[in-house]
Image: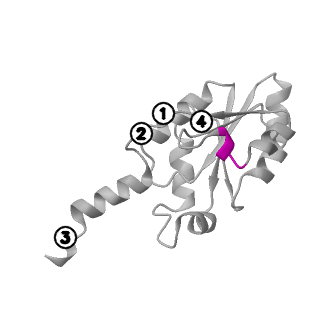
Amino acid sequence: MALVQDERRRGHTIVTTNGCFDLLHVGHIRYLYEASQYGDVLIVAINDDDSVRRLKGPFRPIIPQEERAEMVASLECVDYVTIFSEDTPIPLIRAIRPDYHVKGGDYTLDEMIEREAVEEVGGKPIVGIKVEGRSTSEIITDILQRYGDCGRR
């Protein structure tokens, strides 16, 4: 966490967020941009492949963790990316001690399982925007509906 300590010494406000980011889409982009507006440094924690399978089921992720991390890291609003293996980002939040932790708008503050950990370290939990009709699950459903029988023709 030396990197985070260096950023703090520079007087920077640290923002974290986390997610699977499988099939990166406009909802992710808008919410990451919004999260970046809460501080100077945005750290995005990405679930590793095994934790995505535990959370989303045996057919996920579609995109391997290294590629998901590379895509998220390429966004201008993202400063750092890390991959974590736990089912929740709570250990990472306790280590980073962010000033703000932002979740996508498909959560409420009461549903944010890491809320207590964020508050324990003196941070503020934030619920971000949600772009209706844009989630990885909705995109997969749409693809299956449109192209699901292509292999049977």
- Which is in the foreground here, disc 1 or disc 4? 1
The image quadrant where one finds the C terminus is bottom left
Q: Is residue 98 magenta?
A: no
Q: Residue, x 74% and y 47% (percent of image)?
A: 114
Image quarter of the N terminus: top right
Q: Which residue is mark 3?
A: 150
Badge 2 marks a residue whose secondary structure is: helix
Q: Is residue 83 left or right of residue 21?
A: right
CB of mark 3 within 8 Å of CB of mark 1? no
Indicate the amino acid at tag 3: Cys
Could you give the CA–CA distance between mark 3 and mark 1, rounded to whole angstroms? Answer: 32 Å
Local packing at callout 2 (Cα closer than 10 Å; few below 14, some 14-19, many 20+) is few
Identified by mark 4, the residue type is Val
Rendered position, 100 above or below 148: above
Comes first in the chain, label 3 or label 1: 1
Which residue is labeled 1 in the image? 30
Q: Can the viewer see residue 44?
A: no
Q: Main secondary structure of the magenta part?
A: helix
Residue 142 coordinates in the image, percent (x, y): 30, 56
- Magenta region: which residues? 109-113
Distance from Cα at disc 1 to Cα at disc 2? 6 Å
Q: Amino acid at mark 1?
A: Arg
Q: Local crowd at mark 4 within 10 Å, few (<14), some, or many (≥20)?
A: some
Q: Residue furthest bottom?
A: 152
Which of the colour schemes (rainbow, by chain, secondary structure, one colour) is used? one colour
Q: Is residue 148 left or right of residue 107?
A: left
Q: Residue at x 36, y 59 (%)?
A: 140
Q: Is residue 52 above or below residue 80?
A: below
In this figure, which residue is indicated by the disc labeled 4? Answer: 78
